[in-house]
């Protein structure tokens, strides 16, 4: 079972808008990395820079394997120069498109999506879950079962009601113990074989 990790690039959002104290950030990353190692075969990210990459790199050390990172191989507008130096750290996979396609498609790479903080980017990625569940399921029925798990410690308020009305399977948790229980209760669904055709 794999898991997509999305969240904030600006780490300070976690202590400015969330409840993670700056001096506890390293411990937060360590605990998440160990949790993910115990529960997932691999994690999937964008090879940019942020909370998700801090976790990915530590996960890689613990698991002794490279994390999967999708990148916008066909982007000629924003480009990929700013992320290219990170490629050697990950198992790099092309998304067969630009940054728009990457933002849209990252949350359909696994049925479990963990969100660590709200930013413009993570909200775009969350928004596309609606379309994967509603329309993507006709090409790939497993997409109807995407589950979004949001760490309440990393946000200052829940998603707007319209998100919760239009996206199924949104769960908030206050610690890793609660996340473990949620995953255990959904494990059969989350382990469903998902085939991805970009």
Image (tube, rainbow, N blue to C red):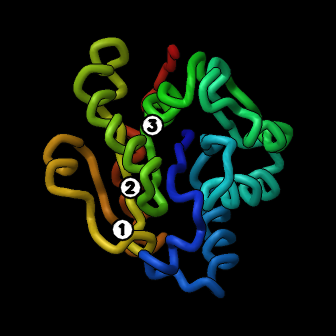
Nearest the viewer among 7 and 84 is: 84
Mark closer to the chain start, 1 or 3: 3
Which quadrant of the figure contains the N terminus? Answer: top right
Label 1's element? Answer: strand
Label 3's element? Answer: helix
Where in the figure is residue 13, as x and y percent of width and height? 50, 71
Q: Is residue 189 left or right of residue 93?
A: left
Q: Is residue 62 left or right of residue 116?
A: right
Displayed quadrant of residue 145: top left
Where in the figure is residue 160, as x and y percent of width and height? 20, 57
Q: Which mark is residue 173?
A: 1
Q: Is residue 180 above or below residue 168?
A: below
For the residues bearing labels 1 and 2, Cβ distance under 8 angstroms: yes
Mark closer to the chain start, 1 or 2: 2
The count of marks equals 3
Displayed quadrant of residue 84: top right
Q: Residues within 10 Å of mark 3 (few under 14, many from 20)?
A: many
Displayed quadrant of residue 86: top right
Which residue is the site of mark 2?
Answer: 149
Q: Is residue 16 above or below residue 5?
A: below
Q: Image point 41% across, 46% down: which residue?
A: 187
Where in the figure is residue 181, as x and y percent of width and height? 39, 63
Q: Image point 63% across, 58% down: which residue?
A: 50
Nearest the viewer among 31 and 156 is: 156
Which residue is the site of mark 3?
Answer: 107
Q: Image point 41% across, 54% down: which residue?
A: 183
């Amino acid at each position: 079972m794999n898991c997509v990790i999305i969240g904030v690039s600006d780490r300070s959002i976690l202590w400015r808008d969330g409840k993670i104290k700056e001096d506890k950030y390293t411990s937060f990353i360590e605990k998440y990395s160990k949790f993910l190692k115990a529960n997932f075969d691999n994690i999937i990210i964008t090879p940019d820079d942020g909370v998700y990459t801090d976790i990915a790199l530590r996960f890689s050390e613990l698991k002794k394997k490279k994390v999967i990172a999708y990148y916008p191989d066909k982007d000629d507008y924003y480009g990929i120069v700013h992320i290219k130096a990170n490629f050697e750290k990950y198992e790099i996979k092309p998304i067969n498109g630009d940054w728009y396609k990457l933002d849209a498609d990252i949350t359909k790479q696994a049925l479990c999506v963990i969100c660590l903080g709200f930013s413009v980017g993570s909200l775009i990625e969350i928004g596309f879950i609606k379309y994967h569940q509603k329309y993507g399921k006709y090409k790939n029925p497993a997409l109807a079962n995407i589950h979004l798990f949001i760490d309440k410690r990393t946000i200052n308020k829940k998603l707007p009601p319209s998100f919760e009305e239009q996206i199924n399977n949104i769960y908030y948790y206050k610690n890793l113990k609660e996340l473990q229980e949620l995953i255990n209760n959904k494990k059969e669904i989350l382990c469903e074989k998902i085939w991805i055709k970009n």
